[in-house]
Image (cartoon, rainbow, N blue to C red):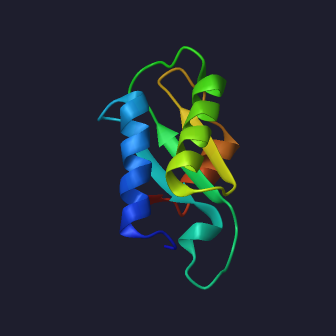
Amino acid sequence: MRLTNDEIAKIRAVVQQALGERARVSVFGSRTDDSVRGGDLDLLVEADRAVANRAAMASRLEAELQLALGDQKIDVILIDTTVHQGALHASARRGAVAL
């Protein structure tokens, strides 16, 4: 996985600050492959409660993560207890690495 321990700690801190300590975060996509260079940071964030406005929260997380990690492309898929999970979520979970 192409994230430093410092980056992992910052990601977890931002997610837990926004969604609580029981929120889980995983990285998926190209950053899980050590042989690939570049690529955006794809994160799957799972809240243990309903989030009033998931789109706004996902955007907030992306912005706060950019501030914490530096300017880079970050994509957040946010799942809460109300989300009907489909193919996108299954695809993100496949090969995801928990942080």
Q: Relative to the observer, which residue lies in front, 23 or 89?
A: 23
Quarter of the figure with the C terminus: bottom left
Question: Looking at the picture, how far across and down is residue 43, in whole percent?
Answer: 56, 50
| Residue situated furthest left in the rendering | 21
Q: Relative to the observer, which residue lies in front, 83 or 43?
A: 43
Count the labels in the image: 0
**Can residue 99 be seen in this snapshot?**
no
Corner quadrant of residue 63: top right
* Residue at x 40% of width, y 52% of height: 10
Lateral position of residue 9 relative to residue 75, left or right: left
Corner quadrant of residue 20: top left
**Can residue 32 be seen in this snapshot?**
yes
| Residue situated furthest bottom in the rendering | 35
> Is residue 68 shown above or below 15?
below
Q: Relative to the observer, which residue lies in front, 59 or 35?
A: 59
* Residue at x 49% of width, y 50% of height: 68
> Is residue 7 shown above or below 80?
below
* Residue at x 43% of width, y 41% of height: 14
* Residue at x 59% of width, y 32% of height: 60
Corner quadrant of residue 54: top right
Question: Looking at the picture, how far across and down is residue 25, in whole percent?
Answer: 44, 47
Question: Looking at the picture, how far across and down is residue 40, in whole percent?
Answer: 68, 61
> Is residue 62 shown above or below 59?
below
